[in-house]
Image (spheres, helix red, strand yellow):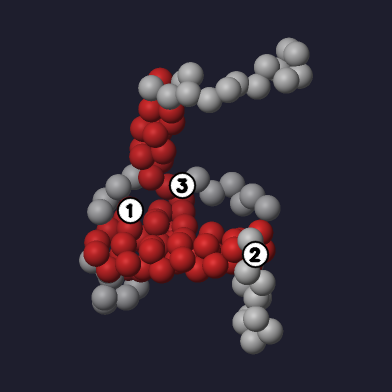
Amino acid sequence: MSNGKSMKDLQNEVDQYISQFKEGYFSPLAMLARMTEELGELAREINHFYGEKPKKDSETEKAIEEELGDLLFVLICFANSLNIDLEDAHDYVMKKFNTRDKNRWTRINIENGE
């Protein structure tokens, strides 16, 4: 379900939300701790869904999508707090993958269907 928001839109939306509170963004170390916490929650869900650790009956069902959303929110907060444009960061990484790492992986041969 796409709503057509760009990464800039997402960063602005999060900034508008955070800007309504006196506390503002957390410090970089606190933000990293929050990101680590959210990543752990995502890892737990992945392990329950794809791994060998089923949920206990007492554990609530949380969707992987929700955990990814939580992680994305914290990542955007982190970037905003450091004035990092995530579209620029993405472009930098894609350029790196398309230059330095362009022959690192086995390409799909579309003509031969491989």
Q: Is residue 100 above or below residue 10?
A: above
Residue 88 lies left or right of residue 108; in this view the side is left
Q: Secondary structure at mark 3?
A: helix
Q: Residues within 10 Å of mark 2 (few under 14, many from 20)?
A: few
* Residue found at x 60% / y 21%: 107
* Residue found at x 65% / y 81%: 56
Name the residue nearer the viewer: 20 or 51. 51
* Residue 59 in the image, given as x and y percentages of width and height: 62, 82
| Residue at the far bottom in the pictured view | 58
Mark 2 vs mark 1, foreground winner is: 2
* Residue 85 in the image, given as x and y percentages of width and height: 34, 45
* Residue 21 in the image, given as x and y percentages of width and height: 32, 75
Q: To which residue does mark 1 refer?
A: 79
Q: Earlier in the sequence, mark 1 or mark 3?
A: 3
Instruction: Look at the numbered discs 3 and 2 and tell me whether their residues touch, using CB distance below 8 Å.
Output: no
Kind of residue indicated by mark 1: Ala
Kind of residue indicated by mark 2: Glu
Residue 104 lies left or right of residue 112; in this view the side is left
Question: Which label was assigned to residue 7?
Answer: 3
Q: Residues within 10 Å of mark 3 (few under 14, many from 20)?
A: some
* Residue 70 in the image, given as x and y percentages of width and height: 49, 65
Name the residue nearer the viewer: 49 or 90. 49
* Residue found at x 46% / y 51%: 9
Q: To which residue does mark 2 refer?
A: 52
Q: Earlier in the sequence, mark 2 or mark 1?
A: 2
User: Which quarter of the picture shows residue 66?
Assistant: bottom right
| Residue at the far right in the pictured view | 113
Mark 3 vs mark 2, foreground winner is: 2
Point out the image quarter for the C terminus: top right
